[in-house]
Amino acid sequence: MPFGYNGKVLHVDLSSGDFDVEDICKEFYRTYMGGSGLIGYYLLKMLKPGIDPFSPDNVLVFAPGVMTGAPLGGMCRFAVGAKSPLTGVFGQSEAGGFWGPELKRAGFDAIVIKGKASKPVYIYINDGDVKICDADHLWGKRTGEAQDIIRAEQNDPAIRVAQIGPGGENLVRFACITNELKHFNGRNGLGAVMGSKNLKAIAVRGKRQIPVADRQLMSEISKEFSAIVMENPLTRGLYENGTAAAVLGNSAAGILPTKNFHYGEFDRAESISAEAMNEKILVAREGCYACPVRCKRAVKSERYSVEPRFGGPEYETLASFGSLCLIDDIEVIAKANQMCNEYTLDTISTGMTIAFAMECFEANILTKEDTDGIELVFGNKEALLATIEKIAKREGFGNVLAEGSKRASEIIGRGSERFVLTVKGQELPMHDPRGKYSVGLAYALSEKGADHMVAAHDTMIASKDQFSFKEIMPLGILEPEKPTKFSPLKVRTFAYLSMWWSFFNAAGICDFVPVPRSSMSIDDVINALNAFTGWKTSVFEVMKVGERALALARIFNAREGFDAKDDIVPERLHGPLKNGALKGSFLPKEDFMQALQLYYGMMGWTENGIPTKEKLLELGLEWLVEG
Amino acid sequence: MVGRRVMAKVIIFKGNKLIEREIKLDSPFPLGDLLDKIDVSREEVGFAICKSDFISMDDLVNPDDEVRIFPPLGGG
């Protein structure tokens, strides 16, 4: 019996209704661990290049990591992957919550789903037993009601449900997947892939204990981490203010995306800040499985019928519906957040796509005749809410925006493409790279399209006197670099941290737990991994796991024709910030392109951004070279 | 001759608030020493911005400058 994982992957064919269980050896877990590593393996093995992401040929993988379910804070994450209908390349998105640990307690380390059901279904896994259940009666229902019905009809209120709402059913290209109504695999439109397979939900119940190799050591690490949560300013800040704290900080620093990335400072940032949330709508601080950080929020607004069961807006959502669209009412943002949660729309892409349309409206490219009578101007709260509804239902103009801003621009034409801010077709998250250059590298290089969760942001590790920086020195990062400077040091730091972050994903570790974003030391992360699995692993081995997962995704994208030409950021980011503390700052294009080339070289990739044969062999991926 | 005494403004983002302080300076002063003067621990500072640029602890702050001080800020 292995420790820390089950050694079993569930395969489901929705076309036939058959399923079987694949036994997996220890070496596989040490090589790929789970998350994006496991997803990359199965997508490359099972998918032919060029398939339509909405066809039954697409494969959908739910993948916790080796550490998911460990009795330790932050060990809750799972990733979902498929070919993305938004980007057309490697799709992968992580979530926290409770669903990942529950799947492992139910006996499986991952689920690989192919085919398409002839009518709506959901998969029910109960302590190793698998059933495919009718979901005709659930189709069209929002998430809250659907979860209530599944729990009632299976007679178990503790079932964990990962599901889609009408946004996923209607194939909105940026539809997400929710678990527990308030945790999200947000990006890349993977909820739409579920919808294309007529798969409404995966309901899981597991009562088994996951065996821990060294329970005493695990307990010691857990106690130590819990003890420092309220002492360390980073984790204490996450508890007290959640991710929302970044709204006011980023605005003061001039890097809060405002009015579709025209500006970096929002003059009404205080009205959508953590303080505003705490004073006006916060009802509870919540957390994920076994986590003492408790960075999640539950909010309530009677004015807009916002219920705490759907959680509360994160920083990304406060910015994407707030400063980006010039909305300064936190209750409206909470309502927009809840609508997206009930319909399962990614709040980043939803906000960005609406901001794109608002800029088109401002430039008279769109008029009320195009928008079904909606006055789609920046700052119009009711227009924001009405447009979200239309997107989720693909009604009228919402049917255009449901394609995402890049495709919407191709439909609209008339020069609207200059207002599109995407990378590989995915909308930018709420961080302006003009004040933190590594984020520009992250946006360009991420195999998933623009993504802010690729490595530490420059502003996290800019001071050599500070805890966050000092704690990453064991990775070989010995000097900080200025946030607005490209240099070999900057690129090397980004390369190392992109591997460290990629390892978190593969292992199922939330990045709000380890250093540098939080307070668990590198040694404790490795010790916890050893305590859970009984392995004797090292920083070297886990960094290679992270690097391998990045290479797999890169090879997947290369098969689809994506390479260095696609590693670019929107032209707007090469122009100056128009206000704020960093007014005038920009992403210098030539230096940026040189930094990308340097990164390719450091990673053992060609000048065209593709891992070399030698690099693949060094990573133990002979099957990719031979295949 | 009397030296020029001007107020430098320091805006500190801490917890959930922006706190403004004004400090009299006769001449350019290293940021690190300025922080010592107002009892801000260097270990709590993630980065600082002055005149549209990031500055380090050794950089000089002029008497009429505005400096913004932040804890480490990341994504997520």
Image (cartoon, rainbow, N blue to C red):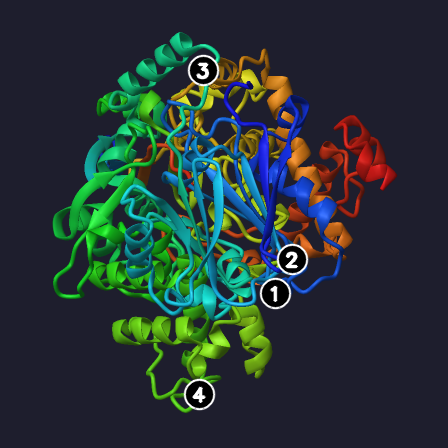
Q: What distance separates the C-alpha of mark 1 from that of mark 3?
A: 42 Å
Give how far apart the Cα atoms at labels 4 and 1 are. Answer: 27 Å
Q: Relative to A164, say whether A171 is above or below.
A: below
First-in-chain label (1 vs 3): 1
Chain name for mark 4: A
Three-letter residue code for mark 1: Phe
Q: Secondary structure at mark 2?
A: loop
Compared across the picture, whether A37 is left or right of A300 comes to right
Q: Which residue: 37% across, 38% down?
A: A98
The label nearer to you, 4 versus 2, is 2
Label 4 close to label 1 by CB (< 8 Å): no
Mark 2 or mark 3: which comes first in sequence?
A: 2
Secondary structure under the numbered disc 1 in the rendered image: loop
Residue most extreme to the bottom: A369
In percent of width and height, residue A447 lies at 63, 48
Q: Mark 1: give few (<14), some (14-19) or many (20+) Cα within 10 Å.
A: many
Picture quadrant where residue A548 is located: top right
Q: Which mark is residue A614?
A: none
| Of the image marks 3 and 4, the number of the one nearer the N terminus | 4
Q: Are marks 1 and 3 on the same chain?
A: yes
The structure residue drawn at horizontal position 26% and vertical position 75%, both measured from the top left corner, is A382
Left or right: A273, with A150 as reference point:
left
Q: Callout 1: residue from which chain?
A: A
Q: Nearer the viewer, mark 4 or mark 1?
A: 1
Q: Nearer the viewer, residue A361 or A330?
A: A330
- Disc 4 residue type (three-letter): Asp
